[in-house]
């Protein structure tokens, strides 16, 4: 077993563990931290795949922005500790059995799959991963890229308008 397999196994375990802990935690802040661990582990998996730009985007967008947005949403809303429901023992065992069954199904699917080696195309150009993504985005996908920026601007203005209405 090589080091990359071990790192992949650990990152996969952290990803799944963060998701399972997010479901089972009772406090919302702990849930956000578990989701952050899961997001960072996914970024590590992207690094193993050789997609460094996607990994950095994952860290910046999901681990940073989305987690901070969730924490601000939690801090700005009113809620009591009594509102956070307690989980019964039966529900915890049912969740554990569901996760174990999903693990068995995925594990057997991976083990029974024929992983034939796919020939890798030699990249004759000396372009880096980030440069290739930039060329694709700003040549083929420039219109969708600009539409997404306009959509995000409209969402930002809408959030400001909604926040101003709540103050009045």
Image (cartoon, rainbow, N blue to C red):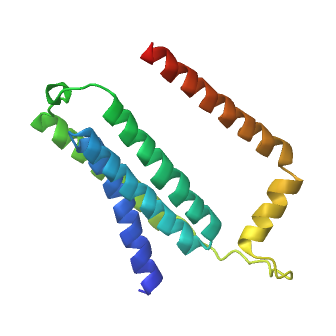
Q: Is residue 44 above or below residue 6?
A: above
Outermost residue toward the right in this view: 139
- Indicate whether 158 appears above or below 58: above
Answer yes or no: is residue 51 visible. Answer: no
Q: Residue 56 vs residue 73: left or right?
A: right
**Residue 75, horizontal then vertical, whole percent:** 32, 35
Q: Describe residue 127's horizontal placement relative to residue 160 as left or right.
A: right
Going by the picture, which residue comes out furthest to the left? Answer: 89
- The image position of residue 130, as x and y in percent, is 72, 69
Quarter of the image for residue 12 reads: bottom left
Q: Quadrant of the N terminus?
A: bottom left
Pick out the residue farthest to the front.
168
27 vs 1, left or right, is: left
Residue 54 position in % (x across, y down): 61, 62
Instruction: Note whether 27 is above or below 35 in the view shown.
Output: above
- At 65% from the left and 77% from the top, the residue drawn is 117
Viewer-proximal residue, 48 or 147? 147
């Amino acid at each position: 077993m090589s080091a990359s397999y071990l790192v992949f196994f650990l990152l996969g375990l952290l990803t799944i563990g963060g998701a399972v802990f997010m479901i089972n935690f009772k406090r919302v802040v702990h849930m956000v931290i578990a989701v952050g661990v899961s997001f960072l582990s996914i970024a590590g998996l992207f690094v193993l795949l050789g997609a460094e730009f996607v990994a950095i985007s994952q860290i910046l967008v999901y681990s940073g922005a989305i987690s901070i947005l969730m924490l601000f949403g939690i801090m700005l809303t009113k809620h009591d500790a009594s509102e956070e429901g307690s989980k019964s023992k039966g529900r915890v065992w049912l969740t554990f059995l569901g996760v174990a069954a999903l693990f068995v199904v995925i594990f057997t699917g991976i083990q029974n799959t024929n992983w034939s080696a796919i020939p890798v195309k030699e990249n004759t150009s000396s372009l880096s991963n980030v440069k290739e993504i930039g060329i694709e985005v700003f040549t083929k996908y420039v219109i969708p890229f600009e539409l997404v920026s306009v959509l995000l601007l409209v969402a930002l203005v809408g959030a400001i308008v909604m926040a101003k209405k709540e103050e009045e």
